[in-house]
Amino acid sequence: MNVEACARAAHEVNRAYCEALGDHSQVPWDEAPDWQKESARNGVMPVLEGAGPEKSHEGWMAEKLATGWVYGAVKDAEKKTHPCMVPYVELPPEQRAKDAIYCAVVRQMLHTE
């Protein structure tokens, strides 16, 4: 399994979804900072091992906490704040959908190689 290809695809689909929601903060994979690419890569294997959207979010949040991120009303990479630094059940539906989409894209990549 090509983790890089899964991470890239999930990132790009997530970016398109965010743009559809009016969030233009995501940059294309080739322009993404290393920390963002690494985060996407780190999320691939748990999904391939069966993690669903809630577990995927928990893993993402644990990684963010470990690297100094905290809750903030506005996403700010410099300040390391993010509005999704809350338990999965507290996420708005459109943010829970991002986790479901990420999982679906990663799983679909299994069928394209």
Image (cartoon, helix red, strand yellow):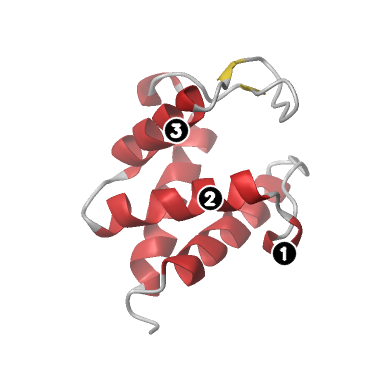
Few, some or many residues within 10 Å of mark 1 (<14, 14–19, 20+): few
In this view, 57 is above or below 76: below
Residue of label 2 = 38
The C terminus sits in image quarter: bottom left
Q: Quadrant of residue 69 in the image? A: top right
Look at the numbered disc 2 and give the secondary structure of its residue.
Answer: helix
Q: Quadrant of residue 1 in the image? A: bottom left
Q: What residue type is labelled 1?
A: Asp
Foreground: 39 or 22?
A: 39
Foreground: 73 or 22?
A: 73
Few, some or many residues within 10 Å of mark 2 (<14, 14–19, 20+): few
Mark 1 or mark 2, which is nearer the start of the sequence? Answer: 1
Q: Which mark is residue 63?
A: 3
Q: Which amino acid does label 2 sit on?
A: Glu
Mark 3 or mark 2, which is nearer the start of the sequence? Answer: 2
Look at the numbered disc 1 and give the secondary structure of its residue.
Answer: helix
